[in-house]
Image: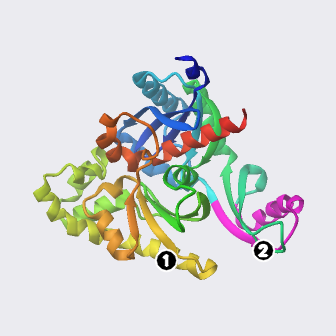
Amino acid sequence: MALPKLFTKRFLGIDIGTSAVRIVELSKQAQKLELSNYGEIRNESFQEEASKVAKKGMVFFSAKDIGEIIRAILEEARIKTRACAFSVPDFSTFFTNFKLPPMTKKELGEAVIFEARQHIPLPLDSVTIDWNLVGGSFDKPSELEVILAAIPNEIIDQYKEIATFAHLEIAALEAEVFGLSHSLTREKDDGLVCVVDIGTQSTTCSIIEKRMLKTSYSFDIAGNRLIDDICDKMSLGSKMGQEIKMKYGVRFFSMLDPRLREKFQKAITDSLDPILKEVKQAIQNFYQEENKEVKKIIIAGGTSILPGVKEYFKSYFNKETEIANPFQDLIYPDVLEKELKEMGPFFSVAVGMAKKGLELKNKQH
């Protein structure tokens, strides 16, 4: 009987990255989430242009250009859904977490805004603030722990323009780290999970407990620099390194013949060391502050598909280690199993934003 389809809810998650635009459409019927559709456009000029402006925290290309790219993906994939949630790159977002003395729920909002002034390097009227209580309780006198994200209004206006050109309706706009939290962690996860998202321009290390983001730290060592370093170690020359970086990114190394891949593996793991040291420091800092130890590491982003990366992370930290697979709890045709597993590290943010949108939609009904 087809009648229940009338009550199916659909939502788009959109990730505008520095090397591609990715879209995921999820649908919800009863309590089940299903992968309805997905699409992406990767372009070598993305990385070239994005690298020039990434530090400024601006969306690369014009809003019209990005809007047209999104429309092309929607048309190609025959996606009709228009409600969407966009992710905002971490380099465009200000993150901080702090503790406050015991107070009532009514007092907390005002206290958070007052404290935010001490942490955000921009006038508060030029940013939009989102915050969550991640520690403490109002039921008994206890210190309250808050995580806060601030997105410049200028960035928000750019995304609104993009949505207008793409003929979309924005229901949510969040830092991409929240998308990762929605797609890669679960309520039933036992203990702390550290998600390491190695992007094209920056790496973000986030510590999450029961799907609640506890802290997040970004640094500039990432995919582009990694490729340069690997090419240098393998004496490939700067010209070839640039071509590999612009045309293929980290996918290049997974495309190699297995025998050649083995030769690259040592260069790859050696080049990862600066990233691992930063992640180790972030984990140690959290342990010193909270006396809680990370149990599992999830690696997201294209770099996670490089040969030997998962194994090297596991041996370095001596912890359970996974490659990001945001599709694992979704319903999809069995024939897509292999393809989705390979796509997972690239689509984690888009899946998370679609999940977020469906959660919001569910609360409205």
Marker disc for residue 191 = none
Marker disc for residue 281 = 1
Q: Nearer the viewer, residue 2 or 36?
A: 2
Which quadrant is home to the C terminus? top right
Span highlighted in magenta in the image? 95-121
Q: Residue 198 placed where, x, y %?
A: 42, 58
Residue at the extreme front: 1
Q: Mark 1 falls on what kind of element?
A: helix
Is 113 in the magenta? Answer: yes
Amino acid at the residue labelled 2: Glu
Question: Quadrant of the rendered structure where residue 297 is?
Answer: bottom left
Q: Residue at x 83, y 66 (%)?
A: 138
Marker disc for residue 143 = 2
Whether tag 2 and tag 1 are in contact, CB under 8 A, the answer is: no
Q: Is residue 48 visible?
A: no
Amino acid at the residue labelled 1: Gln
Q: CA distance from mark 2 to mark 1?
A: 25 Å
Q: Residue at x 43, y 61 (%)?
A: 298
